[in-house]
Image (tube, rainbow, N blue to C red):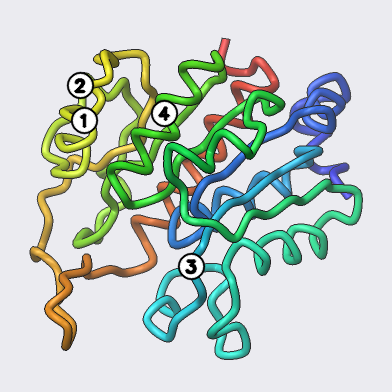
Amino acid sequence: MNTRTEALIGKFAMDLLKERKVFVFGVGGVGGYVAEALARSGVGTVAVADFDTVEETNLNRQIIALKSTVGQNKAELMAARMRQINDKIVAKYFPEKIDETNIRYMMIEKYDYIIDAVDDVKAKVAIIKMAKEKKIPVISCMGTGNKIRPEKLKIADIKKTTTCPLAKAVRKALRVEGITEGVKVVYSTEEPLVSGTEDENGKVSPASAIFVPAAAGIMIAGEVFRDLTYLNE
């Protein structure tokens, strides 16, 4: 199925991808596109974790969100979708909310790359901290909500991030853990258009459109793809 990709990067790199194992935490607006791209690129094993279910509000941007999938678990849907794309892939899923306790039972030390695409600061720090502890490369997505300009996205070390409120919060939390650099992130330099939307329960969620989350997911997948095949060297 990957003759076009192999024509681009060669058989050696393609064979490397078949042996690689990647763990994607969060398969919503960003992580869904990451997992999709990795599956289509020929990565041999992709695990996904997400406790959430598809909602009507996800239909504007999430790749697994359809009228027919509303109410279903995102991780399970993404694993099934990856198998439909590549019947050779080992697609694992964990329908769980990530915290410092359960992440230890997901055997991330068996993976070659960790991708953080969750939106909770504590969970992001737990993922990054565990990846650093196990000496596994990790890339983390910062805020993509309230924005419409994908061309403002950048890949950088977290210590060099600007503008993004989520990056600021994550930097602060990581400092408490003694982590100040060496964390690759995708972030946006775009100033947020709005501060978010409030539902009937008073919960404020980021406003969103498909462009920035999807582009961030593809950027992350591309970076991981190049790292795993040594094309970034």
Please give the residue where the numbered disc 4 appears in the rendered image: 128
Please give the residue where the numbered disc 3 appears in the rendered image: 52
> As drawn, which residue projects farthest toward the top?
233
Q: Are marks 1 and 4 in contact (CB under 8 Å)?
A: no
Disc 2 secondary structure class: helix
What amino acid is found at the position of numbered circle 3 in the picture? Asp
Q: Earlier in the sequence, mark 1 or mark 4?
A: 4
Residue at x-position 36% and y-position 39%: 124
Q: Earlier in the sequence, mark 4 or mark 2?
A: 4
Please give the residue where the numbered disc 1 appears in the rendered image: 173
Disc 4 secondary structure class: helix
The nearer-to-camera label among 2 and 3 is: 2
The nearer-to-camera label among 4 and 2 is: 2
Q: Earlier in the sequence, mark 3 or mark 4?
A: 3
Q: Is residue 180 above or below residue 171?
A: above
What amino acid is found at the position of numbered circle 1 in the picture? Ala
Please give the residue where the numbered disc 2 appears in the rendered image: 176
Residue at x-position 36% and y-position 31%: 185
Label 1 vs label 4: CA separation?
11 Å
Q: Are marks 2 and 1 in contact (CB under 8 Å)?
A: yes
